[in-house]
Image (spheres, rainbow, N blue to C red):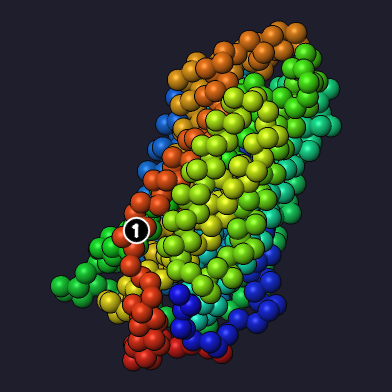
Amino acid sequence: MEQKTDAKKYVPKKEVQAYAIAALGQGLVYSCMSSYITDYYMNVLTLNAMFVILLMLLARVWDAINDPMMGMIMDRHTTKKGRMKPYPVATALPIAILTILMFVNPGFDTDNKSIWLYVFVAAVYVAWGMIYTVSDVPFWSLPNVMTPNPKERGTLISYAKTVGGIGSAVTVALPIIVGYFVASMDIETANIVKYAVMAISMAVIGMPLFTLSSFKTKERIQIPNAQKKAPGEASTLKRIFTCKPLMLVVLSGVLSFGRYMLQAAAPHVARYSGFYLGSTAPTTVEEINKNISNVALVIQICAAVGMFGAMIFLPKLYKKFEYKHIMIVSCIGGFVASLFTLIIGWTTKNLLICIPFMLISAIPLGVINNVSFAMVCDCLDFMEWKTGFRDTGLGSACQSFVNKIGNAFATVMIIVMYMVVNIDVAQLNVGSGEAVVQAINSLSSTQNFAMFSLVTIVPGISLLLCALPLFFYDIVGEKKNKIFSELAVSRKDRGIAIDE
């Protein structure tokens, strides 16, 4: 059903492009962490698996506090430069430095695993997450104040997410490409080099682009600062947690954590699933390094093409279908495709035959990344319409938290799989070339299958679960149109100005 919304457009083309380029810069950096941090911790630093699990989970517990705090700060304070715009430029340099430190060991002993290595890793990871929150929540809140037109807002988000996805794809591809040039090195050195190249180059390029959102965008909706809670008035947190549509979107987002695994688990699958491109299994370290790059490249290309294909067509789909229906159909389709990938891939042992199904299973990556955020924005409109309060920052913080908790769950799932099937990375990445080759080729069929499931049925089940809460989401059709039309009138009465 086509939405009947305000046809007036507020955001000029140059501003849309600037915001999208800023998203590209953010994507370059965020993908370093989201796609490769588990592989770096497990197969380069060879950290204790339980330590990594606890680090990821405890950091997300802190985010449960940190993200809403950032949202409330934004809602309560407006600077001379705006409510959201000052934060990206203020955080760009710290994020760049911490990104490099996350993937470049400054000299701690990784062989003996000194306590200081673990302290360093934990401090950098937590600090990166906190400062990233200070930039991410305001950045993705900007569309809410750049235009009052929900249709234009949805298109703006979709365009920025698509361009940002290009940044993610570049980051994902870079270590794979560098892998071909360092194939002759031993596995341990090759990993160190390719991750250092990735982190340094993406941080240096990405963060300057990200600052464009502070200089080249305009906050047109001037929302008054949140006032101290009046007696008997519901708190901001209560408004958020009693907003049923928003909580359904948040729950759906958390359940969709498996969507991160197609990219994040790719290097693990490439190392240990037993798949290889060629007529014979690798017999040297150089062949193993090249095969890791080949298999990871196939998986990542499928993820990128499926994701971008969905993103490109989303603006057209928005004109004909409701957000919830796009989400539900893509998630169910992704589950079916992942099931076929598992069955066909494992029975034929031919990864290339799986490509069509992997492409389809990657479509929800693009759909969920874009559509869920647009749904959060609609939920904020619903809250404003129902309560008279516009909790832009805190509402957007929910989406930021969902993304980070989903990424953490995906990471934990990968590490748990290592532990369940007893893959000892310390024995698979060090020693003489012959010993490494023999160790990797001696992994059991169960271990190989477990790794392959990380990019097939595990994310597939997650997608199926993601669709369930959306059946109860009701900001659609006439109700949605009524909310938007009545908001336009009520905003004037509440002192919310809209600049041209």
**Which residue is at the front of the view, 260 or 191?**
260
Question: Is residue 4 at least partly visible in the picture?
Answer: yes
458 versus 478 height, above or below: above
Q: Residue at x 16, y 74 (%)?
A: 231
| Residue tagged 1 | 471
Where is residue 290? Give x, y as percent: 78, 27
Asked which quadrant contains residue 239, the reply is bottom left
Residue 198 on image: x %, y %: 72, 41
Nearer the observer, 97 or 481: 481
Q: What is the total number of numbered labels drawn onto the structure image?
A: 1
Quarter of the picture containing the C terminus is bottom right
Q: Nearer the viewer, residue 380 or 113?
A: 380
Question: Residue type at mark 1?
Answer: Phe
Foreground of the two, 240 or 112:
240
Element on which disc 1 rests: helix
How packed mark 1 is, by other alpha carbons closer than 10 Å (few <14, some 14-19, many 20 or more), is: few
Quadrant of the rendered structure where residue 386 is?
bottom left
Residue at the spot x=65%, y=82% of the render? 12
Decide if residue 42 is in sight here. Answer: no
- Horizontal side, residue 444 vs residue 429: left or right: left
